Image (cartoon, grey):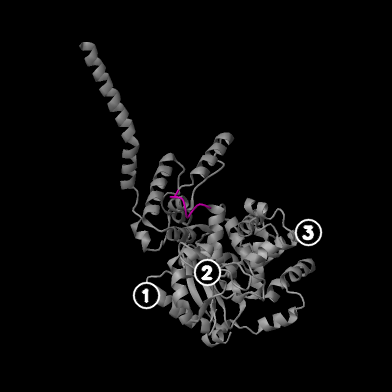
């Protein structure tokens, strides 16, 4: 009996010790959660200073000239995410794969050579706990990161991050950074200026204005290439397989010309493309940036035979931006414009209003597109389908032939939050359009088994005045 009693006491002690150590992390988490600062006020209050600023601005005052989320170019926000934290919009505040990779590198080097902080963690660190590099500080930073993710939207976290990080000596926030380096606002930055600013984020202190440098740094060139690769990805394995027996596939030399034309176009027009205003890119503007070989190839594959390109471009030059109005749409990166001729916009607003009144979700995927922008899309699709010409032009129309470029009866591509492209057919919005769109002068351009020989496009609706439709 005594032996059984001793055994029971031993088991109780082991259980108690086990529960104690099991509860210790939870207790520590609860304690840290209570003693770390609240972040509730950050939902509405813009930051005036940070722990980082207080550390490095002790001898001279630093200020933040706050820039609202929509006043920062979509290009900059998208590029920062791509370089600093690709999974930002999907993770819960921590880059677990990156953290494990950094730990391995640091152990191998026996030194702190690699960090893997997410944008949320960097925001927490800059706001509250910059000064030391202890485990205790890292734990508090992690708790603040959890609080930020629980309390704020991803867009708000990114907005705060871009408004508090350092861009130069006593220069904090993207507004001051853009002004200091390029004398511009954050909404005006070009592709090269964006890549230059992102390149200095890890070590911006004592940095001279970037516009004083004659050549881009190696880091800036690396970042530029990473961004371009994300915008112009190579063909998928499926595309490679599907086009293996393509009868009209471009030669390697011509593929290089396509890649170069894509990169040049994005380099010169990235800011406008990401804001939605790149749709006004004319064919003349696009081709001005190309060399003779690239231009000859584009004209060969994009311009119909026996058609005067000079006449087409002269006709396009008559289309003025003042004749259009912008329909604003939102993405995770902010506002984006879809442009419509004024007479089309009137009918579209009525159509969408009526749809909303009937609890039908209807959003714009694409609207007017100039011939230069249409050419850019055609080249992009061409690269993604392994440079197979028939496949590419079964997906996207050539410039000057697309209904999206017709001023008088511009086409609209519709979507919902859950359906776009071919899946739009399964949405209630598609069925509603079939019954009601004609009342507002919109007609399905490519229905199933259409006599134009085009694939069925449930999303593609052309605006045509009623009398024109009846006449045809």
Badge 2 density bin: few <14, some 14–19, many ≥20, Cα 10 Å: many
Residue drawn where x is 20% and y is 11% of the image: 1
Q: Is residue 141 above or below residue 214?
A: above
Which of discs 1 and 3 lies nearer the camera? The answer is: 1
Instruction: Give the residue number, with chain letter if any, for mark 1.
Output: 357
Residue 143: image x %, image y %? 38, 47
Image quarter of the C terminus:
bottom right
Residue depicted at 33% across the width and 53% down the height = 38
**Earlier residue among tags 1 and 3:** 3
Left/right of residue 360 with respect to residue 72 in the rendered view: left
Mark 1, other Cα within 10 Å: few <14 / some 14–19 / many ≥20: few
Q: Position of residue 198 (x, y in %)?
A: 58, 57
Please name whichever residue, 402 or 65, is drawn nearer the observer in this view of the structure: 402
- The location of residue 230, given as percent across then percent down, is 61, 57
* Mark 2 lies on residue: 459
Is 441 above or below relative to 384?
below
Please indicate whether residue 252 sits to the left or right of residue 357 in the image: right
Q: Nearer the viewer, residue 64 or 302?
A: 302
Say the numbered circle drawn on residue 253. 3
Q: Which circle's residue, 2 or 1, is located before the other in the chain?
A: 1
Residue 84 can be seen, yes or no = yes
Magenta span covers which residues?
Answer: 86-93
Q: CA distance from mark 1 to mark 3?
A: 54 Å
Q: Is residue 404 above or below residue 181?
A: below
Judging from the image, what secondary structure is the residue with disc 3 in?
Answer: helix
- Of callouts 2 and 3, which one flags the residue occurring earlier in the amino acid sequence? 3
Disc 2 + disc 3, Cβ < 8 Å = no
Question: Which quarter of the figure has residue 216?
Answer: bottom right
Residue 288 counted in the magenta span: no
Q: What mark, if any, has residue 345 been given in the picture? A: none
Label 1 secondary element: helix
């Amino acid at each position: 009996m005594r032996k059984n009693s001793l055994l029971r006491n031993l088991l109780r002690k082991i259980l108690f010790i086990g529960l104690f150590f099991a509860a210790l992390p939870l207790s520590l988490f609860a304690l840290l959660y209570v003693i770390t600062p609240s972040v509730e006020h950050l939902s509405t209050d813009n930051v005036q200073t940070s722990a980082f600023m207080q550390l490095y601005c002790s001898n001279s005052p630093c200020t933040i000239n706050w820039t609202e989320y929509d006043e920062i170019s979509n290009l900059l926000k998208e590029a920062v995410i791509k370089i600093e934290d690709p999974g930002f919009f999907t993770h819960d505040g921590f880059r677990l794969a990156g953290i494990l990779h950094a730990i391995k590198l640091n152990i191998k080097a026996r030194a702190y050579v690699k960090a893997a902080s997410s944008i949320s963690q960097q925001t927490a660190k800059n706001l509250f706990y910059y000064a030391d590099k202890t485990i205790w500080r890292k734990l508090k930073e992690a708790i603040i990161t959890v609080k930020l993710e629980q309390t704020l939207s991803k867009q708000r976290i990114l907005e705060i991050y871009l408004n508090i990080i350092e861009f130069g000596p006593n220069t904090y926030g993207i507004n001051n950074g853009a002004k200091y380096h390029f004398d511009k606002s954050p909404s005006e930055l070009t592709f090269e200026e964006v890549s230059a600013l992102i390149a200095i984020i890890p070590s911006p202190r004592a940095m001279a204005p970037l516009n004083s440098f004659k050549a881009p740094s190696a880091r800036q060139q690396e970042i530029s290439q990473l961004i371009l690769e994300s915008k112009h990805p190579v063909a998928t394995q499926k595309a490679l397989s599907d086009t293996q027996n393509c009868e009209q596939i471009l030669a390697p030399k011509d593929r290089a010309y396509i890649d170069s034309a894509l990169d040049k176009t994005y380099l010169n027009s990235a800011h406008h493309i990401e804001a939605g205003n790149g749709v006004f890119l004319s064919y003349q503007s696009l081709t001005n940036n190309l060399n003779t070989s690239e231009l000859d190839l584009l004209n060969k594959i994009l311009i119909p035979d026996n058609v005067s390109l000079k006449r087409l471009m002269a006709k396009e030059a008559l289309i003025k931006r003042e004749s259009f109005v912008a329909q604003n749409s939102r993405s995770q990166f902010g506002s984006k414009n879809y442009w419509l001729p004024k007479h089309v916009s009137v009918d579209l607003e009525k159509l969408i209003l009526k749809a909303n009144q009937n609890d039908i979700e209807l959003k714009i995927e694409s609207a007017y597109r100039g011939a230069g922008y249409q050419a850019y899309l055609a080249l992009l699709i061409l690269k993604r389908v392994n440079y197979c010409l028939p496949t590419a032009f079964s997906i996207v129309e050539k410039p000057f032939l697309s209904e999206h470029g017709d001023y008088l009866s511009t086409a609209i591509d519709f979507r919902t939050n859950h359906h776009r492209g071919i899946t739009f057919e399964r949405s209630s919005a598609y069925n509603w359009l079939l019954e009601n769109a004609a009342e507002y002068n919109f007609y399905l351009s490519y229905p199933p088994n259409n006599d134009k020989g085009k694939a069925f496009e449930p999303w593609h609706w052309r605006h045509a005045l009623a009398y024109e439709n009846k006449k045809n």
